Amino acid sequence: MKQYIVLHHSATPDGVVYKDFDAIKREHLARGYRDIGYHWVVEMVDGKLVASPGRPEWDDGAHCIPRNKDSIGICIVGNFQETVPTDELYMFVADLCRQIMSRHPIQEIGGHRDYDATACPGKNFDVEKVKRLVKGELYMSSIFKDVDPNGWAYPDIVRCVDVGIMSGYPDGTFKPKQQITREEMASIASRITFQACLIGRDLIKKTLAAVVTVYRNDGGLGTGFFISPQHIITNQHVVNGAKSLMIVSDDDKLHGKNLTIVATDSKYDLALLKCPVANDNYLKVYQGEIYHGQHVAVIGSPQGYPYNVSQGVITNPKRADNPIDDPNLFSTDAAISPGNSGGPVINGRGEVVGVVRSKFVDVAVEGMGFAVRAEFLREFCKKNGINV
Ligand SMILES: [Zn+2]
């Protein structure tokens, strides 16, 4: 069983730096290993960070003697004894760790040096930062080298940056003690006015590109969203009994494509569909606790009008007193209409916190919509071979 993730860099103690996956593999084979010793190699290919798989994750590694059986080894190409990792790299490594953690009961992320007498992954590599990113305590936008994470204003800075009200400087600083001018004050005030919504313009654009309208052959419709390049989530009741299904998106590439049903779950009213064409825009599923009053947005096609956004809060994160008495649902007051079914409920970072399921309809009721919690969505996807 894999309970650890061990991080390495590709430099040897005498300063030789292996430049890519192939060079590392060649070196390991030359040392008599049966394969590359790591499970993953993170490297830059054509200016883009990629994670290349080495040994299968279930297999023993050959990267950290005390931990070869119970860990997954990630090697990051570079020499962090000499150079400083970029924030982009930290974020990428943290994402990879999260993915691994969705497949294995990982209890600890460590550097090679935590388990063996070595400097690997280099004195400039901050393993704690990876851990905090994985836990969601740090967001990419809030990593500024001059902001103290323990400072009193830290949560406010994180929030302001996250919703786009303030930003940092291109050199990675925030300049927390800098005086602001009237000009800057006007700019901030104007952003508050125009971005009082939960999610900024860029984020909403990216999220909308992952959302589609699902049409049934009999004229019915619902909302769906990409969860991987080719997989779409919607409600089971949106697809149930349909002879054929087709999607419409803003993007001509996907317009009118026919979908196949991969799996459905009647208890939680979820369906997993496959699209014949890949979409680069897909949504991440939130890992963490949702809370009373948390701001969320709902995206979908209410009454068949596509790409509508409504906002609200989570009115109860775990209520058993919903119409179907199910603690795997949460409730929200974000406006939901028929046609929203199967659409995503997203948080301020554009991550899916739930799947719209139903609305409590009664003349005396206002603002009671229900959504399937992200934990169940993840479980449903995993059961069907997709890790989200
Ligand atoms: Zn190492």
Image (spheres, grey):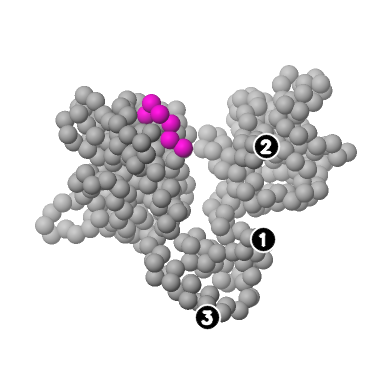
Residue found at the very far front of the displayed protein: 252
Q: Quadrant of the N terminus?
A: top right
Q: Which mark is residue 171?
A: 1
Q: Badge 3, how many Cα within 10 Å: few under 14, some, many 20+?
A: few
**Residue 277 magenta:** yes
Q: Which mark is residue 114?
A: none
Q: Amino acid at mark 2?
A: Glu
Q: Earlier in the sequence, mark 1 or mark 3?
A: 1
In the displayed structure, does residue 228 sit left or right of residue 55? Answer: left
Residue span colored magenta: 275-280
Q: Which mark is residue 43?
A: 2
Provide residue 145's location: percent of width, then percent of height.
Answer: 67, 62
Q: CA distance from mark 2 to mark 1?
A: 23 Å
Structural distance between the alpha carbons of marks 3 and 2: 44 Å
Q: In the figure, is residue 156 to the left or right of 308?
A: right
Indicate yes or no whether the magenta region holds residue 8.
no
Taken as a whole, is the magenta stretch helix, strand or loop? Answer: loop
